[in-house]
Image (cartoon, coloured by chain):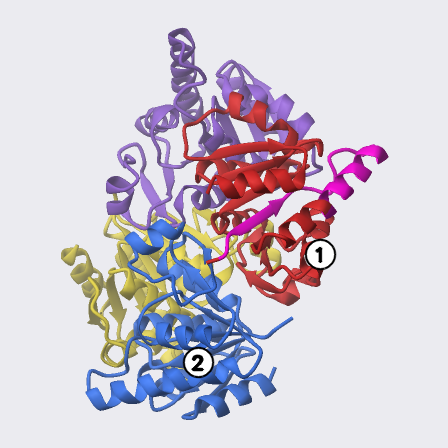
Chain colours: A red, B blue, C yellow, D purple
Amino acid sequence: MKIKVGVMGSAAGSGKPEIAKTVTEKAEALGQAIATQGIILLTGATTGIVYLVGKTAHDAGVLHVGISPAINAQEHIADYKLPLDACDTIIFTGFGLKGRNVVLVRSCDIVLFIAGAMGSLNEFTIAHDEGKIIGCLTGSGGVADEAGYLLEKFAKRTRAQVFQDDDPESLLDSCIKSL
Amino acid sequence: MKIKVGVMGSAAGSGKPEIAKTVTEKAEALGQAIATQGIILLTGATTGIVYLVGKTAHDAGVLHVGISPAINAQEHIADYKLPLDACDTIIFTGFGLKGRNVVLVRSCDIVLFIAGAMGSLNEFTIAHDEGKIIGCLTGSGGVADEAGYLLEKFAKRTRAQVFQDDDPESLLDSCIKSL
Amino acid sequence: MKIKVGVMGSAAGSGKPEIAKTVTEKAEALGQAIATQGIILLTGATTGIVYLVGKTAHDAGVLHVGISPAINAQEHIADYKLPLDACDTIIFTGFGLKGRNVVLVRSCDIVLFIAGAMGSLNEFTIAHDEGKIIGCLTGSGGVADEAGYLLEKFAKRTRAQVFQDDDPESLLDSCIKSL
Amino acid sequence: MKIKVGVMGSAAGSGKPEIAKTVTEKAEALGQAIATQGIILLTGATTGIVYLVGKTAHDAGVLHVGISPAINAQEHIADYKLPLDACDTIIFTGFGLKGRNVVLVRSCDIVLFIAGAMGSLNEFTIAHDEGKIIGCLTGSGGVADEAGYLLEKFAKRTRAQVFQDDDPESLLDSCIKSL
């Protein structure tokens, strides 16, 4: 069965334009790196930087499965204001954003973070406690750059392994090799 | 986006060998019918008649997504005694059998029933209340043959449409046309 | 710890006024019977006949815990159009109606049915498959009167025990004794 | 309806004995403070410092509702190794630890943190994103002392309000007044 890689993160790590540009470039490079690996991409079928990774991977032929907080496509679009077009298929949990995150992270073999605010931090805590392989794309800000702090301050023994790298391809390689 | 068809049902509609044979033939024919339509198959990644449909479709090239009650692959195999080999990828809900059914049914555009005991009846009630297109493969026993009774005795106005047919291909056609 | 009894069912077993009157009387009698037993009542914090049982029990001093499909009180009222006043406290699942049912039934030691259409049938299937003590208040129509048929047609071996009685007090007694 | 206050946190903020002693004292004081307010206590029906708060409040007459990751009491005890005796009643989600947290936090009006490692950080992110009143008992370590950092680094606009105080009674007062 193909490896399932989840990508999580927010719109940008900072309001500063030079960082936004860097994050956008890393997102596209990550989408391309995913496309070279024969893996399945999982995301929250969401907007921002995650959409960009998902769309890039999808357009490059990757199977992209979105895990939605909504009960169906109508609610996904109308109530959550989320897009459908970057995904190949959508799983509808109907559990809201935070309930959806649980199903999303559980379904991944590897969970990658690019930037990421409080919502991504939620996903990081699930990934850590459920013992996933975690990859942090450093230089993108947010959760991806704060992993060291998080692991020190909120330490808990789990089977999780955390990799940090500022190069998408190399980060993905390290995560896949550790499986 | 491709149509998502869920297949639900139990091991057999009856202990009688002649019915088991009929159900097996219908299951394989349903798997083949799914393969001709360019659709995605969703199941509970389970055993019995549903496994047979899923394996047939998978082997014929259909993308088969299993929705698991387990938190991860290890629990799927060790605790739930469920197979992985008929699926192309698995979503892990970690919400147990009855919680898993909610995510499974919500994710389908069309829900097909072949035979089916109390567990499938659970899925029928979700599909009905959440307004899905429902197809019942008659002559297989269980839920698939009792839909008329269920709709009469437990009537409730929803957007659900129920089709009944003893031919897998024709049943699937009717369901797809009604979308 | 006190026994937790869930009450499930729909608005009425039939549109016929004489049945509606019978069901109303049985609902109030059930609420009173619950109040004499020192037990905790669980419901879906919903309308109709279940509201009537819950309000009667609540007003007679029973602790009534509602399990809501909503994410919070605002959604409970505004989107689901559900009442709060019969409950002493509410648990918010945010999993929608069918996801809520899973948490509701799992939390009960005993699950009672009074009347009940497709939504209650969903709860019956969960209660049966998860091995609960089930009590059916016969003469109220719907699920409560169809248990015999359901157990025969959709037979599956579980730890569930099903009691049927047209007297609320006597039904509750039988269920409690079987624990 | 009574205010529902959730208490979350880990065994201790540090392995140092003098901190463990402080946290224990604060936990008992928090349990007593809850008992003076006529509120309902919600916890994860768990061990450690949260057990201590819950047991203190329970013994002082507070209604303590535990939200369990397990499907039923047997799994709660045997598989999750969790206690039942500090709770007055238990809701069984069957959604695992991280799924349980979603239902637990959603059900609270106020969420209090005392110490807290990665599991509590998960609950903090849910509470923040779903706009809860959050109280951090400072001087206990972990999440409770890192709220300032978390809000700065993972900033996101929600309706959440965060209070910090090293006195349990005063913290609870501030949270209740802000409702």
User: Tag 1, which chain?
Assistant: A
**Badge 2 amino acid:** Gly
Dot 2, how many residues are within 10 Å of its Cα: few (below 14), some (14-19), or many (20+)? many
The residue furthest left is C177
Report the front residue among A148 and D157: A148
The residue furthest right is A17
**Badge 1 amino acid:** Lys
- What are the residue bounds of the magenta stretch? A2-28
Quadrant holding the C terminus of chain C: bottom left
Q: Is residue D85 magenta?
A: no
The residue located at (64%, 54%) in the rendering is: A35
**Looking at the image, residue A108 lies above or below residue C140:** above
Q: Position of residue C109 (x, y in %)?
A: 26, 54
Dot 1, how many residues are within 10 Å of its Cα: few (below 14), some (14-19), or many (20+)? many
Q: Which mark is residue D77?
A: none
Q: Which mark is residue B31?
A: 2
Quadrant holding the N terminus of chain C: top left
Which residue was labeled with disc 1? A55
* Disc 2 + disc 1, Cβ < 8 Å: no
Report the front residue among A88 and C48: A88
Disc 2 secondary structure class? helix
**Looking at the image, residue D69 lies above or below residue C169:** above
**Looking at the image, residue B32 lies above or below residue D61:** below
The residue located at (78%, 37%) in the rendering is: A22
Report the front residue among A64 and A14: A64
Relative to D150, C34 lies left or right: left
Q: Position of residue B132 (x, y in %)?
A: 53, 76
Disc 1 secondary structure class? helix
Whether residue C144 is visible here, answered yes or no, is yes
Q: Position of residue B158 (x, y in %)?
A: 53, 77
Q: Quadrant of residue D56?
A: top left
**Looking at the image, residue D87 lies above or below residue B34:** above
